[in-house]
Image (cartoon, rainbow, N blue to C red):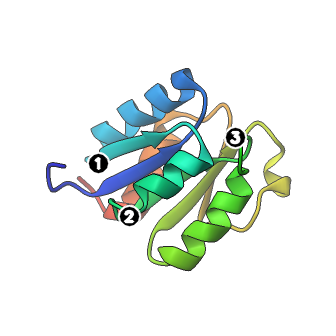
Amino acid sequence: MSGLPVALVVEDSDDQAGLLRRYLERSGCDVVVAASGEKALELLETVSPVLAIVDLILPGISGEEFAEHLRRTHPDCLLAITSVHDATRYPEADAVLPKPFTGAQVAAVAERAIGSP
């Protein structure tokens, strides 16, 4: 890692994960991506993200289950939920990014987590 703030993206779609990576890197983050909740749990053993963007629909444990774990173990990490579901169905989070999200929406969430680049 380069010393930049770390953003964790938990997203099983390569296209969506790549898009989030680009937006977050432009916002000044180092980005780690997990394609499942289980992989994200492993990553939390070695990284301390300031921001986690979590898709609700994941293989294995759900995004909601991972988000609950993240809240317990990394309470200072800003949690953003993304999904194709209606945002009124999202679990409690610091921010929401309903799909399709825009670069400006992701940048605003990143700014909340790390401040302006």
- Give how far across and how far down residue 99 sits, in percent: 68, 35
Q: Is residue 8 shown above or below 36?
A: below
The residue that label 3 is drawn on is 58
Of badges 3 and 1, the one in the foreground is 3
Q: Earlier in the sequence, mark 3 or mark 1?
A: 1
Residue at (37% x, 31% y) in the render? 22
Q: Secondary structure at mark 1?
A: loop
Q: Amino acid at mark 1?
A: Cys
Q: Of 35 and 91, which appears nearest the observer?
A: 35
- Residue found at the far left of this picture: 2
Q: Secondary structure at mark 2?
A: loop
Residue 50 - label: 2
Q: Splitting the image into 4 quarters, where does residue 58 fall? A: top right
- Give how far across and how far down residue 100 sits, in percent: 66, 31
Residue 6 - label: none
Q: Earlier in the sequence, mark 2 or mark 1?
A: 1
Q: Amino acid at mark 2?
A: Val
Q: Is residue 115 left or right of residue 55?
A: left
Q: Residues within 10 Å of mark 2 (few under 14, many from 20)?
A: many
Q: Splitting the image into 4 quarters, where does residue 98 fall? A: top right
Residue at (48% x, 45% y) in the render? 9
Q: CA distance from mark 3 to mark 1?
A: 23 Å
Q: CA distance from mark 2 to mark 1?
A: 9 Å
Residues tagged 2 and 1 counted as in contact (Cβ below 8 A) = yes
- Give how far across and how far down residue 62 sits, in percent: 73, 50
Q: Residues within 10 Å of mark 1 (few under 14, many from 20)?
A: many
Q: Amino acid at mark 3?
A: Leu
The residue that label 1 is drawn on is 29
Q: Secondary structure at mark 3?
A: loop
Of badges 3 and 2, the one in the foreground is 3
Residue at (63% x, 62% y) in the render? 67
